[in-house]
Image: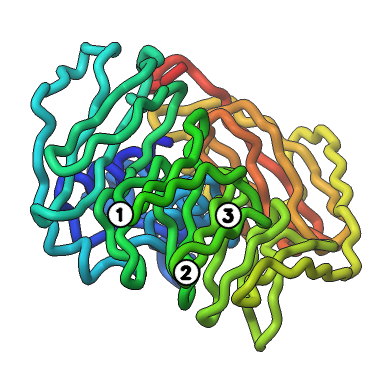
Amino acid sequence: MDIYAVSLVKLGDGNNLIGYYVYHGGTNQIGKLSTFQESKATGYPNDYPILSYDYQTALSEYGEVGEQYRLLNLLHLFVQDFQETFAPMVRVEAEQVVRRDDTSSLRYVMRTDGKSGYVFVNHYQRLSKLEDIQGAVINTGIVTFPPIDVRGDISFFLPFQIDLSGSVLTYATAQPLCRQANAYFFVQIPGIAAEYQFGDGQKFTPVAGKRSALRVNGIAIVTLTWDQARYLRRLDGELYIGDECDLFKANGEIRSVEEGDFDYWYWNGEGFEFRSVRQPYTEPVITFTNVGQPLFEPKHTEELHIGGARKVTWQKVTVTGSQGFVNIDYYGDAAQIYADGELVADSFYYGKAWRVPARLLDGKECYLAVSEIRDDFYREF
């Protein structure tokens, strides 16, 4: 939500050129004469891992999908399909400006062309808890939305007076996602019932789900649940929903980032068709054995002593199986893995298990080094 809320707020504030410093993490190479990472020794303000350039971003350095990827995709789908009418819309501030320390007032802004637009609501602030808001009524000056309850950590936006293939949607208490031919897709915001009011007086309150399609004036309105929308993907112009799996397309085939069997739904223009893929997968096995020192001379141990000399513990690691990832739940300042004498992965501790592809370690003589953690750096709890 740190990432999603910031990106949604920026859209509401007028941002049209969406971009990210790092969207897909990477792995630095090691040169013949030196390492290539940023460090204080080479004139940079901070010391970074030698190999890992991950940043816990949308896609990890090894291609795993983060929750921020799924949430940002909700915005990207919308921008892709509605950019031509959305981009010219200007930002209009709410009548009441909410201070950072005000945790009880609704935080919202509008983008509009004077006739139609979107109301952006942010109910999330990092390291703070915002109070639930009951029966909030948002009056855009053009359309007044029905009362909504805004609860929990959530950010969303609502459309008003939007043209949907000739039918005017007066308002919806659901977030627009994308368009596919004559079908318009929305996501139900957690805690808020989806309601659609059209200019000709028709009103609908569907139950969200893959079978929620309703027909109005020659178009279809599909309302997905929040969890379903997180796995909605457009691949080569077609829409798919993964069954709690992240889909992509390669060589003309639908695949899942997560290895093993997976299910998904395909939008055929009328509804979602269920499909299933079966493929072999064997979970890798990892074992650890404490050792005093590795049986070789490590080349890059300076990374384990950033900020001063630290105690380093070593373990021999044995991995059987090349599919999937192994979890290394270490507690320390920094960690390295050497495979057959070469540094193949490193990590700075940030409170979560370190996930390493089994293929990097399978069948090799591997050692894990972890340097002691001390109270000499900034941490959040």
The residue sitting at the bottom extreme is 251
Q: Determine which of the numbered discs, if any, sits on residue 377 in the image.
A: none
Measured Cα–Cα span from mark 2 to mark 1? 14 Å
- Give the labeled residue for mark 1: 199
Q: Residue 65 carries which label?
A: 3
Q: Which quarter of the rendered picture does the N terminus lie within?
A: top left
- Compute the Cα span from label 3 to label 1: 40 Å
In the rendered image, residue 262, in percent from the top left (x then y), is placed at 80, 62
Task: Please name the amino acid that badge 3 sits on.
Answer: Val
Please report whichever mark, 3 or 2, sits nearer to the chain's N-terminal start.
Answer: 3
Within-10-Å neighbours for mark 3: few <14, some 14–19, many 20+:
some
**The furthest residue to the front:** 201
**Camera-side residue: 235 or 329?**
235
Horizontal and vertical percent position of residue 380: 42, 20
Q: How crowded is mark 1: few (under 14 residues within 10 Å), some or many (20 or more)?
A: some
Q: Is residue 172 visible?
A: yes
Residue for badge 2: 219
Direction from residue 82 to residue 89 in the image, left or right: left
